[in-house]
Amino acid sequence: NAGVMQNPRHLVRRRGQEARLRCSPMKGHSHVYWYRQLPEEGLKFMVYLQKENIIDESGMPKERFSAEFPKEGPSILRIQQVVRGDSAAYFCASSPPEALSMGEQYFGPGTRLTVT
Amino acid sequence: GENVEQHPSTLSVQEGDSAVIKCTYSDSASNYFPWYKQELGKRPQLIIDIRSNVGEKKDQRIAVTLNKTAKHFSLHITETQPEDSAVYFCAAKVDNDMRFGAGTRLTVKP
């Protein structure tokens, strides 16, 4: 089991460009969560998805940010027209179906986004 | 929604001493409380967790206690070692909603 995979690990974008962050959950996991971590700060919830469904996006900024988890392929966090304040580490976590877990989440290695 | 507070923000102990990190939560419906360890530049790693129907859980040098009435839970690390140095996050989960504390930076001095 390869664990949660994220790519790219490091991403540099200029202001105004788009950033696409990918997350492949652990095998058998159907729930994906995205978190943002600013330097020296904690993990802030952004969005919770299941396949083809956004369950909770209460932590997502209203503009420029979107997320999807298609039937096939990884989950994508998309940031349009990036600004310097978007520079952060973005972590994806996955968890098994509810019937098989307490809700524990396993984190990917993160994508460190730098906006110049 | 759930609100999780974590104290202290920094903690420095001598190798071999114990370390205690405390968290409080606001939503009495929270039923799952994990603790994560994050080393510099690495991903958060789940180190121990507890459900709301259990008051204490221990795994070698690490233990977690839960007081549902007071809505607080604590992480205890005994016989600390330099490799325990990291940032520790508590979290509380209700339904699909997991909220994290702000983190405690633990430094274990050799």
Image: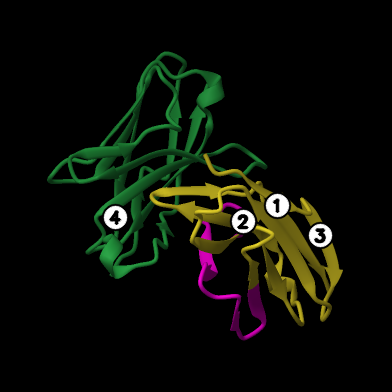
Chain colours: A green, B yellow
Amino acid type of the residue that numbered disc 1 sits on in the rendered structure:
Gln
* Residue A67, position as x, y percentages in the image: 30, 33
Callout 3: helix, strand or loop?
strand
| Residue that label 4 marks | A25
| Residue that label 2 marks | B89
Mark 1 vs mark 2: tell me if same chain. yes
| Mark 3 vs mark 1, CA separation in Å | 12 Å
Which of these two is toward me, A74 or A53? A53
The residue furthest bottom is: B60
Above or below, comparing residue A9 to residue A19 in the picture: below
Between marks 1 and 2 in the image, the one whose residue lies nearer the viewer: 1
| Residue that label 3 marks | B11
Q: Chain of mark 3?
A: B
The residue furthest right is: B14
Mark 4 vs mark 1: tell me if same chain. no
Callout 1: helix, strand or loop?
strand
Amino acid type of the residue that numbered disc 2 sits on in the rendered structure:
Phe
Q: Is residue A82 magenta?
A: no
* Residue A48, position as x, y percentages in the image: 35, 42
| Mark 1 vs mark 2, CA separation in Å | 8 Å
Query: Considering only order in the chain, which callout, 1 or 3, is on the residue closer to the N terminus?
Result: 1
